[in-house]
Image (cartoon, rainbow, N blue to C red):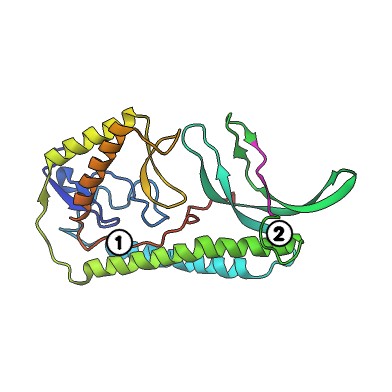
């Protein structure tokens, strides 16, 4: 493989990447849309400056995703009659990285507990899959749902309320993100014409590498904040990164902003939400 001499923007995510052998190097999604993960589908293809042959495929994939989300929304908003399966936003611990929130499916049950000789009834959500404890063991995934604004105290009412919340805070925003992505891609190809590739900025690469090395040395990790949906550097033991790491972070942001300003077709827009995270289910 020849060493990259130029950079180009990805047909899928729009980010500027190096072009070894004239094709985009392997890269991950920006996670800007809330539903990207893994290796970007634009990797190992020609850049947008030279070709737009993949974009219609990406648009079709988002249109298909919207249809699936709309069908899920219709089914979830239908009042339950017997089944009490509901989506719940749970905190998931991890041995290797900072814990995070994700959507999981489970069963709403009514339970009773004796307190001071008196019987109390309350509702619990029991996840279909176990959760990991801090010591790495599988434990039952159980959450109380009494803190939610329920119409009454029945499992069916709780199921309807939880699923409506899932639709409002995840599905609706995921649909909007797909719609924005489609509009952004169509805007890119509206008046498309080939453009010359930009040469590799070796000095910027060196500066970026040095800044990342400083952050990693300080014990920082690169992850997505589930509250703000922003991607950044975080320290597991607190928000303050230290003077050297803060200076490196400032330099890294400057370099990334310069790279972002070179995007072809403008900067994609998203609907941000602390709840827009990829759901998981055993189904």
Report the span colored magenta: 139-145
Frontmost residue, 197 versus 257 = 257
Name the residue: 47% across, 68% down.
67
Decide: few, some or many residues near mark 2? Use Cα within 10 Å; few <14, some 14-19, many ≥20. some
Vertical relation: 105 (above or below) 159 = above
Q: Is residue 8 left or right of residue 222?
A: left
Q: Quadrant of the N terminus?
A: top left
* Position in image of residue 180 (x %, y %): 36, 67
Q: Is residue 260 left or right of residue 216?
A: left
Vertical relation: 200 (above or below) 162 = above
Q: Is residue 120 left or right of residue 135?
A: right
Is-magenta flag for residue 83?
no
* Position in image of residue 175 (x %, y %): 45, 66
Name the residue: 39% across, 37% down.
240
Name the residue: 29% across, 57% down.
12
- Mark 2 falls on what kind of element? loop
- Mark 1 falls on what kind of element? loop
The picture quadrant where one finds residue 216 is top left
Q: Is residue 254 left or right of residue 163?
A: left
Q: In this view, which residue lies farthest toward the right? A: 117
Judging by the rendered image, the residue that carries numbered circle 2 is 84
Contact (CB < 8 A) between labels 2 and 1? no
The picture quadrant where one finds residue 63 is bottom left
Vertical relation: 216 (above or below) 76 = above
Judging by the rendered image, the residue that carries numbered circle 1 is 268
Decide: few, some or many residues near mark 1? Use Cα within 10 Å; few <14, some 14-19, many ≥20. some
Q: Nearer the viewer, mark 2 or mark 1?
A: 1
* Position in image of residue 157 (x %, y %): 72, 64
């Amino acid at each position: 493989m020849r060493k990259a001499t130029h950079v180009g923007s990805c047909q899928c995510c729009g980010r500027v990447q190096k072009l070894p052998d004239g094709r985009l190097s392997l890269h991950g999604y920006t996670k800007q849309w809330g539903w990207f993960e893994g290796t970007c589908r634009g990797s190992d293809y020609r850049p947008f400056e030279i070709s737009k042959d993949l974009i219609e495929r990406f648009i079709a994939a988002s249109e298909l995703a919207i249809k699936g989300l709309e069908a899920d929304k219709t089914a979830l908003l239908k009042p339950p009659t017997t089944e009490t399966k509901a989506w719940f936003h749970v905190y998931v611990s991890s041995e290797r990285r900072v814990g995070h929130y994700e959507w999981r499916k489970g069963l709403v049950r009514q339970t009773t507990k004796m307190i001071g000789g008196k019987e109390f009834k309350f509702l619990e959500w029991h996840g279909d899959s176990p959760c990991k404890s801090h010591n790495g063991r599988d434990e039952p995934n159980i959450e109380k749902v009494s803190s939610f604004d329920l119409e009454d105290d029945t499992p069916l009412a709780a199921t309807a309320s939880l699923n409506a919340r899932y639709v409002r805070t995840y599905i609706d925003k995921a649909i909007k993100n797909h719609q924005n992505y489609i509009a952004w891609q169509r805007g890119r190809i509206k008046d498309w014409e080939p453009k010359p590739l930009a040469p590799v900025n070796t000095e910027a690469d060196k500066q970026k590498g040095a800044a990342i090395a400083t952050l990693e040395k300080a014990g920082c990790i690169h992850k997505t904040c589930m509250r703000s949906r922003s991607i950044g550097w975080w320290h597991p033991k607190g928000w303050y990164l230290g003077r050297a790491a803060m200076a490196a972070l400032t330099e890294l942001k400057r370099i990334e902003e310069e790279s972002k300003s070179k995007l072809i077709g403008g900067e994609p827009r998203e609907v941000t939400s602390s709840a827009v995270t990829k759901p998981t289910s055993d189904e």
